[in-house]
Image: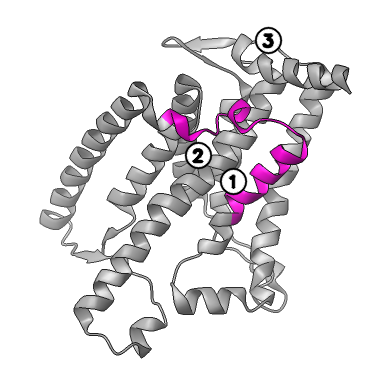
Amino acid sequence: MKEALLQLTDAMANETKGTRGSPWRQLTAVAEVTLLVPAFYFLIKSLVLTPIPLIQFRLVGWDFFAHALMAVVPIALIKLRRQRLRDYGISLRQLREPEAIQLAIAASVILAAVWLVLAGTLLQVGGYQLSLNLPDAWFAKTWPVNETWITLIGVALTLVFEVVFCGLGEEVMFRGYIQGRLNAAFGRPWTIRGTRIGWGLFLSAALFGFGHGLGFFNPFGEKDGWSHFTFAGHAAAITGLQGLIFGWVRDHTEGIAAPAILHALIGLFYGIIIFS
C-alpha cells in the first residue's frame, strides 16, 4: 500500500518536475479523459428523460445542475483515488495569491476594454441593440412581483450561473482534473515565457472545445435524435482558443483559481449583456 502511494505521489510530481510518466500511464490518462467528456456529455443530456430539467428551468432558468456535476464528478474521482485536490491545482488558497489577483485585475481591464470597443462598434455600425441575457424562468410568469424585481432576480441568477457555476464548475473539470491528470502523465517539457507546459494544455483545450461544440445537440431530446446531429464548429473553435488561454494561466499559476476568475469575467462581460 505504501509503495502504491509513493508511486501515485511520484506520478503527480511529474507535473511540477516536467518529467514524463510511462507510456502505459500516458495511454491510460488519455483514454480516461477522452472517455470522460463524452460520458459526462451523455449523462447530462440524458437528464432530459427525467423531471430535473423541467423543474430546474422553471425555477431558475439556467442549467445549474449540470455545471454543479462538472465540479462534483471530478472531485469525487480524485477522492476515490485518495489523491489531494491541490495536486490537481484545486485549492481556494490560491485566491489569496498576489499573482492570481494581479492576473484577474489585468484580465478584467482588458476584457472591459475589448467589450467597450465591441459594443461601440456593434451599436454604431452594426445597428445592434443591447439586451439582458435573462433566464426565461417560470417564476417570472407566476410570482406576484413587478417587472423590476423580475429583472433583478434574473440578473442575480445569471450572475451566479455565469460566474460561479460556469466559471468554477468547468474549470474544476477541464483545467483541474483533465489538465492535471494529463500533466501528471506527460509532464510539462516545454517552456513558454517562463511557464512550463505540456500535452495536457493542448488536449484539455481540444476537449473543452469539443464539448462546447456538442452543446446544442441532444440525442435524447426527440425521437431518432441522432438523425439531427449538429456540431457547432464556431463554438468549438472559440472555446478551444479560450481553453488554451485558461490552460496556460492554470500552468502559469499552478492552479485553477486564476483561470476560474478569468472564465467568470468572460461570463460577466459577454454572458449577461448580449447584442441583438
Along the line of sight, which residue is nearer the eye, 270 or 158?
A: 158
Q: Amino acid at mark 3?
A: Thr
Given contact means CB atoms under 8 Å apart, are the residues at marks 1 and 2 in contact?
Answer: yes
For marks 1 and 2, give the CA distance: 8 Å
Residue 219 falls inside the magenta stretch: no
Q: Which residue is mark 2?
A: 240
For marks 3 and 2, give the CA distance: 26 Å
Q: Nearer the viewer, mark 3 or mark 1?
A: 3
Q: Quarter of the image holding residue 194?
A: top left
Residue 210 bears which disc, if any? 1
Along the line of sight, which residue is nearer the eye, 223 or 165?
A: 165
* Left or right: 130 as drawn, with respect to 251: left
Given contact means CB atoms under 8 Å apart, are the residues at marks 3 and 1 in contact?
Answer: no
Callout 2: 10 Å neighbours few (<14), some, many (20+)?
A: many
Q: Which residue is mark 3?
A: 19
Which of the two labelled residues, at mark 3 and mark 1, occupies the earlier sequence position? Answer: 3
User: Could you tell me residue 15's position as x and y percent?
Assistant: 63, 18
